[in-house]
Image: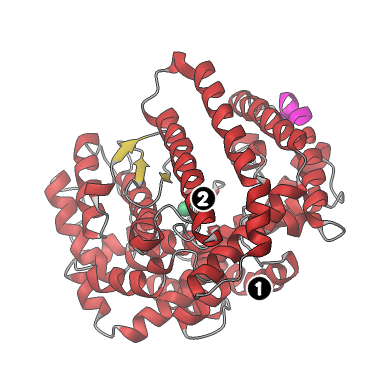
Amino acid sequence: MSYDNMMSFLRVTEALAEVAGRTGWDQETMMPPGAAPQRAEEAAALKTVLHDRSTDPRLGAWLEEITPKTPVQAANLRILRHEYMRSCRLPADLVAEIARTTSLAHRAWAEARAAENLSVFLPHLTRVVALRREQGAALAEGGDPYDALLDGYEPGMSSARLSEIFDGMRPGIVDLRARVLDRPAPKALEGHFDPHAQRLLAEKIALVFGYDLERGRIDTALHPFSSGSGLDVRITTRVDPADPLNCLYSTIHEVGHACYEQGIDRDYLLTPLGHGASMGVHESQSRLYENQLGRSAGFAEALLPMMRDAFGDFGIDDPQTLYAAVNRVEEGFIRTEADELSYNLHVFLRFDLEQALIRGDLQVADLEAAWNDRFAADFGRDVPKPSLGVLQDVHWSEGLIGYFPTYSLGNIYAGSLFAALRRARPGLDAELAAGDLSGATEWLRSHVQRHGALFTPDVLIAEAAGEEVSSQPLLAYLEEKFGGLYGV
Ligand code: ZN
């Protein structure tokens, strides 16, 4: 009986959280600009209600008295105990102060970025880091504050384990990337690509990858994102007339996130299990859809005629050239535009710097210099301006510290899952070449997506991949793919 009462209470909380998420979506897509001050109050009101519910003493009593009778009940209780414990360790005034500070810091970050000058942002970031250190310490109760922050995004993961995995990957990636960059760059796409045609192609491809538009929609926003769960999972994309691959692969990436949410067992709707297992697992789906499937040699064969339908003759007329073009390795500065080889190096840089900030080994005043030194060491180039360096990502301004490593973890999970998928479907390349993604996405749905948060991330991935999580399958995939493409 207590269990049913608790689940009824949670269903309301989950529904309110979905509404809060949808106002966030609206803010990025449809909201008239003059509504901003009112929306801030609306969002704050919902946030207060949600925080009160997540620390409600009734919840504490239920969690103490209930003994789970099924694996689903046990999983719900596991998640709730974790979240309740975290919520209760945080004083309400600290939560409010972080919300206020990050809202101001976000604005200062945008201003500093536009002006190519950190000075207006530094006092804000100093405050954000101090508050997150305080939060980490409160959550950790004597343990490591950075690990406590990380645990909010990737439950059960530690920075020590991540460092071990990342440090193990790094030499292989640096070496392969150096060999690739020594070779001539493949042909790039050039010309003007009609924005409307790009949108139509993106929608067509979203359907090919299994996105259900009856329970979703695609809109345009400054930054691509996916939001919502269950029966209402929306994505956004962006259109650059000079670069149709931006819209195309942003869409496939967000479709990966959205298909994960849409693929969760309907019984878990509006319950704690009705979401992805972690940020890392979420990113494994989006990256696998985008890279291992979307940027495969097989899918290039299916993509070429679709692009010719959309844009006419665009200067590429064989699938191998298109495959090389969508996998160009470049000496860029920006993480979100990075190729598969460079991407993780960007993440390792942020992971190491943010740990140093939280542990007090690096002061915010020295952050820009530390970033630029590390970038020069890893990428062999000097950062010419802050928007191409320390100011490129929004995360730290929003207080998202501990989040970056889940991007690389997602790539590692994707590597393991893709190796298992290939073993399970020997005809995968031919399926992709025929533009038939159903076998691959169905495998992901049944092995990963449908479970929602039923299992912890490490158990879920190990079960699906048939082996313990390691970076080896990702490294082997990168070596095979880029070794082949660049003849190194
Ligand atoms: Zn993503």
Q: For the point 51% across and 50% down, which residue is it?
A: 10
Residue 163 image point, x, y percent: 71, 68
**SS for tag 1?**
helix
Could you say which quadrant of the image residue 433 lies in?
Answer: bottom left
Q: For the point 74% across and 57% down, which residue is it?
A: 148
* Viewer-side residue, 17 vs 29: 17
Label number found at residue 175: none
For the record, the magenta segment spans 118-124
Inspect the magenta stretch and tell me whether residue 218 lies in it: no
Q: In this view, does 136 lie above or below 481?
A: above
| 245 displayed left or right of 342 | left
Residue 380 in view of the camera: no
Whether the residues at callouts 1 and 2 have beta carbons within 8 Å, the answer is no
Residue assigned mark 2: 10
User: Which of pointers 1 and 2 indicates the residue nearer the eye?
Assistant: 2
| 204 displayed left or right of 338 | left
* Viewer-side residue, 159 vs 476: 159
**Mark 2: amino acid:** Leu
Label 2 crowding class (10 Å Cα cut-off): few <14, some 14-19, many 20+? some
* Viewer-side residue, 138 vs 63: 63
**Mark 1: amino acid:** Ile
| 465 displayed left or right of 405 | left
* Viewer-side residue, 479 vs 178: 479
Coloring scheme used: secondary structure
Residue 355 image point, x, y percent: 76, 54
Inspect the magenta stretch and tell me whether residue 120 lies in it: yes
Identity of the residue furthest to the top in this view = 34
Residue assigned mark 1: 165
**Secondary structure that dominates the magenta span:** helix
Residue 257 image point, x, y percent: 40, 55
